[in-house]
Every structure is written in structure tokens, then in C-alpha cells.
Image (cartoon, rainbow, N blue to C red):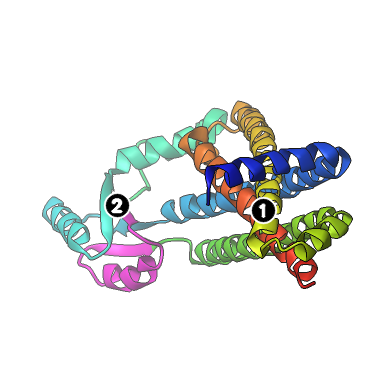
């Protein structure tokens, strides 16, 4: 492709955009809105997945030791727990620490424990964290058989419900993103097709005078890419501001809510949407021209 041809394609691209300002504005607006909605759903899906992962990582097994268990047995139990496959951390909770934690949970009502006097009903225990939640159901039966262990609890019903919730969040988010991406491609392709349809006479004349398909296609292709790129840039700018505002609002009330940090997350999201918008513009233009090049 010669330099003069490239200059011609670029000039024709911007000439067409200027000549069809209303249609170009409609195309950019459609791309912006479509990618903005897609980006919002993608943000929701990715943060839902992040929340699901965070919840899964919070699952742990609490191992209660029998009353009167010797210190040697407790030390041996700790070593056994640490050596089990999938165990990443074992935290010892003494009887006094367990009582102090319970008092903190009661808050102003901790005076209810005064009736206990010097008695401490809480057993020595361990908090066992694993690398993945699926390990828990494998480890609990083994832990129950250990010497000195009274019982091992992990809130089975809660864990099972949480697993169901995380699966729904991940699968539902993925389905929504795929459906919305397909709808975005359809809308953008049809918007560009309208632009090409308005210039079908011009395309037919160029074909009749001997212009090759690619010579005709390039200005439209560049136009579609430019419109897709412009709409995607606007969408990412709005999305960045919206996400930053949402994050600031949530952190003022729920400081420990596991939202994905803005950097470099929004950078990757912006690059992804810009590439998607540009690619969709090019694909939409190519598909739209097929019919009109068959002269």
C-alpha cells in the first residue's frame, strides 16, 4: 500500500465522519452506551468473583480440645495440624484468649459472665486455615480422630450455602457479560451498517469504475475503527469516574468490603474496552460492506 493511498484513506475517513456528523455521533453514542453498560456489568461480575474468593478464604475449621488435655498432647496436635495437606495456617487460642474474645463480642453486656466467677468454660482450641474450601470436608473427619480433640467445627450449613452463592455469582456474572457483549456487537454492527447503507450509491459507483474491494473497504474500516475507538475512550472515562465514586462511597460505610483496587484494575479494564470497541467497529464495518460490494 503506497503512502498516497494511505493518505487518501485517512482523508476519506475523516471526510466521511464530517459529512455524516449526525450518523457518526449516533454511532459513537451507541458504542459509548453499549460499552459503558458492558463495562459496568463486567465490573460487577469481577467484583462479585472477588467477593466470592474473599468469602471462600475466610472459611476455617475450629478445633476444640478436650478439657484437661496435657500440654504435650496440645503441642503434638498443633504439629499434626500444620503437617496436614492444604493447611496454610494454624492459630492457637488459649482458654483465656477465648474468654476475652467472647467478652469483646458481648460488649456492654459482658457483665453477664460475672456469674461464672473464676470458672472458664471455654476449651483450648485451634483455628485452622486451608488453601481452598474444598479441603475442609476432607480434613474434618481426620481431625476428629486425633488424640485430645473434642470436636472440629466449620459451620457446614453456612459453608455449603456460601459455596452455592459463590457459584451463582460467578456463573450468573459470566452469562450476563457474554450476553451483553453479544448484544453490544449486534447494536454496533447494525449502527455502522446504517452508515454504509446511506452511502451505497457511492460504493456501487466505485465498483463500476474498477476500484478493488479493499480500496473501497479501507476508508469504511478505518471509520468504523475510529468510531469504535472514540466511543470506547468515552466509555472508559465515564466508567473510571463511576467506579472511583462507588468505591469512595462504599469505603466510607464499609471500610473492609473487598472491592478490587482501582489501580491497575481500571487500566486493564480501559485497555480491554478500547480494544473491544476498536475491534467491533472494524468487524461491524467489514460485515456491513459485504452486501454492498457484491455488485
Circle 2/circle 1 CB separation < 8 Å: no
Residue 197 placement: quadrant: bottom right
Q: Residue at x 65, y 65 (%)?
A: 175
Give the spatial CA distance, label 2 vs label 1: 64 Å
Q: How many numbered discs sit on the rendered protein? A: 2
| Residue 112 in view of the camera | no
* Residue 113 drawn above or below residue 38: above
Q: Is residue 9 left or right of residue 154?
A: right
For the C terminus, the quadrant is bottom right
Q: Residue furthest front?
A: 209
Give the labeled residue for mark 1: 221
Q: Is residue 29 left or right of residue 114?
A: right
Disc nearer the start of the sequence (2/1): 2
Is 174 part of what is drawn in magenta?
no
* Residue 192 drawn above or below residue 33: below
> Residue 222, how many percent across, how many down?
65, 48
| Element assignment for label 2 | strand
Give the labeled residue for mark 2: 126
Q: Residue furthest left?
A: 72
For label 1, the crowd category at 10 Å Cα-Cα, with few meaning under 14, some 14 to 19 and many 20 or more, is many
For label 2, the crowd category at 10 Å Cα-Cα, with few meaning under 14, some 14 to 19 and many 20 or more, is many
Q: Nearer the viewer, residue 130 or 224?
A: 224
> Residue 104, how many percent across, how many down?
47, 33
> Residue 69, how many percent across, how many down?
20, 56
Q: Is residue 28 left or right of residue 268?
A: right
Residue 36 placement: quadrant: top right
* Residue 172 drawn above or below residue 71: below
Q: Residue at x 41, y 37 (%)?
A: 101
Q: Which range is magenta?
A: 126-152
Q: Nearer the viewer, residue 53 or 253?
A: 53
Amino acid at each position: 500500500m503506497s503512502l498516497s493511498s494511505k493518505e487518501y484513506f485517512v482523508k476519506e475517513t475523516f471526510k466521511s465522519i464530517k459529512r455524516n456528523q449526525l450518523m457518526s455521533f449516533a454511532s459513537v453514542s451507541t458504542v459509548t452506551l453499549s460499552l459503558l453498560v458492558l463495562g459496568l456489568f463486567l465490573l460487577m461480575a469481577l467484583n462479585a468473583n472477588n467477593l466470592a474468593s474473599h468469602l471462600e478464604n475466610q472459611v476455617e475449621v475450629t478445633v476444640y480440645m478436650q478439657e484437661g488435655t496435657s500440654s504435650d498432647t496440645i503441642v503434638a496436635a498443633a504439629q499434626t495440624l500444620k503437617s496436614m495437606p492444604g493447611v496454610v495456617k494454624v492459630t492457637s487460642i488459649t482458654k483465656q484468649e477465648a474468654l476475652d474474645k467472647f467478652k469483646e463480642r458481648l460488649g456492654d453486656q459482658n457483665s453477664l459472665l460475672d456469674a461464672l466467677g473464676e470458672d472458664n468454660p471455654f476449651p483450648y482450641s485451634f483455628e485452622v486455615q486451608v488453601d481452598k474450601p474444598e479441603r475442609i470436608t476432607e480434613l474434618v473427619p481426620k481431625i476428629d480422630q486425633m488424640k485430645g480433640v473434642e470436636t472440629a467445627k466449620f459451620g457446614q450449613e453456612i459453608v455449603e450455602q456460601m459455596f452455592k452463592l459463590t457459584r451463582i455469582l460467578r456463573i450468573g456474572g459470566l452469562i450476563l457479560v457474554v450476553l451483553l457483549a453479544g448484544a453490544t456487537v449486534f447494536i454496533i454492527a447494525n449502527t455502522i451498517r446504517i452508515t454504509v447503507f446511506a452511502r451505497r450509491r457511492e460504493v456501487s459507483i466505485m465498483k463500476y469504475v474498477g476500484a478493488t474491494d479493499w480500496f473501497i473497504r479501507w476508508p469504511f474500516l478505518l471509520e468504523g475503527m475510529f468510531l469504535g475507538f472514540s466511543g470506547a475512550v468515552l466509555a472508559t472515562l465515564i466508567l473510571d469516574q463511576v467506579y472511583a465514586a462507588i468505591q469512595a462511597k462504599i469505603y466510607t460505610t464499609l471500610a473492609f468490603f473487598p472491592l478490587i483496587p482501582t489501580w491497575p484494575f481500571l487500566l486493564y479494564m480501559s485497555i480491554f474496552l478500547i480494544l473491544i470497541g476498536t475491534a467491533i467497529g472494524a468487524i461491524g464495518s467489514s460485515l456491513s460492506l459485504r452486501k454492498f460490494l457484491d455488485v
